[in-house]
Image (cartoon, helix red, strand yellow):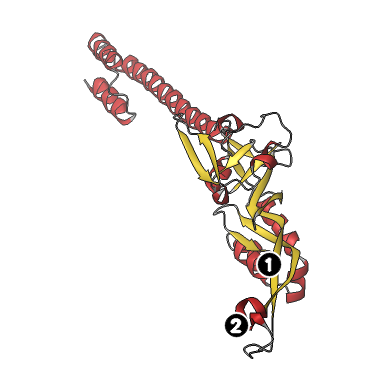
Amino acid sequence: MQCLRYISNTARHLGLWKNRNTFAAAEYMNRKMKGERELCIHTCSMLVAVFSLNLYVAQGAERISHADALRQDSSQQILYTPDFRFRDGIFVNFDQVRQNNPISKSRLISKLAYDDPDFFSKLLDGSDRLQYFDNLGTVQEVPEKELWGYADRGILYIALNDGYFRVNIIGNICHFIASQTTYSNYTNPYYPYYSPYNYYSYYPYYYNQYPGNASTEMRQYLIDFRTGNILDYDVESVEVLLMSDPELHDEYAALKKKKKKQLKFLYIRKFNERNPLYFPGPQEG
């Protein structure tokens, strides 16, 4: 019975008590070999070895299964590289950009030919609303002014300042250039003096306001790809975006003011290299 008790305790310690066949075999052997202590101990040692081997194999299988799961998760993510291409279509919001899941051409309701190389530039020509089929086949509408942007031939374009502009640098910090138009008006400095010889003096608003010049300038912007926020391309914005990488942020913050201005782009590139951008794996939008 000492042999049986030894086997039982060992099996319980190794978590193999549920293996009733093994335990029954041990009990039978114990009855048959009563009085043969040395042979029983030898048999117990063999059984313990078998138990240990089974436990090792089970734990190994569990580790392999966990590793496979991790590999599967990573395989569902696509690392952004210069060869990455966005799926062509309309992005209603930034979440669709993050998921690389636009409204594809085939779901857009338009009289334009889908193979027209200028499909998107013609579609987005200032139309009030765009129509498309959602995932359930229901027709939906969205004002063009509410679109985030679109992708054409794998290239990402963002809507800003009544236009669409290519996002040239993609990463967790994006960079792009967009035009901005400003207008100035000239006001008659002699207003509100009345002139009896001028009919329009009774309408000073029309008389005293002169159309000014429209000026267009190119400005640089940044996109925080974690939130979709658009920021000016300046030292303050770069410092804010670098905060999620404390080591790199402290390095940049320690620079002198002139160096910070000169090295903005270099630190954006460093950040993107240290914090790579991933997109979900293959899926249809």
Q: Nearer the viewer, mark 2 or mark 1?
A: 2
How packed is label 2: few (under 14 Cα within 10 Å), some, or many (20 or more)? few
Residues 31 and 174: in front is 174
Which residue ends up furthest to the top in the rendered image? Answer: 32
User: Vertical placement of 99 versus 241: above or below?
Assistant: above
Badge 1 element = helix
Residue at mark 1: 251
Pick whichever of labels 2 and 1 is earlier in the sequence: 2
Residue 71 at x, y = what percent? 56, 32
Residue at mark 2: 202
User: Vertical placement of 72 versus 46: above or below?
Assistant: below
Q: What is the quadrant of residue 7 in the picture?
A: top left
Badge 2 element = helix
Residues 251 and 66: in front is 251
- Report whether 93 appears left or right of 183: left
The residue depicted at 22 percent of the width and 11 percent of the height is 31
Give amino acid for label 2.
Answer: Tyr
User: Vertical placement of 62 versus 218: above or below?
Assistant: above
Residue 218 at x, y = what percent? 75, 62
Give amino acid for label 1.
Answer: Glu
Instruction: Compute the Cα span from label 2 to label 1.
Output: 64 Å
Report the number of numbered marks: 2
- Report whether 136 appears left or right of 120: left
- Report whether 103 appears left or right of 164: left
Q: What is the quadrant of residue 199 in the picture?
A: bottom right
Quadrant of the image for the N terminus?
top left
Which residue ends up furthest to the bottom in the rendered image? Answer: 193
Residues 249 and 212: in front is 212
How packed is label 1: few (under 14 Cα within 10 Å), some, or many (20 or more)? few
Quadrant of the image for the C terminus?
top right
Residues 145 and 169: in front is 145
Residue 189 at x, y = what percent? 69, 87
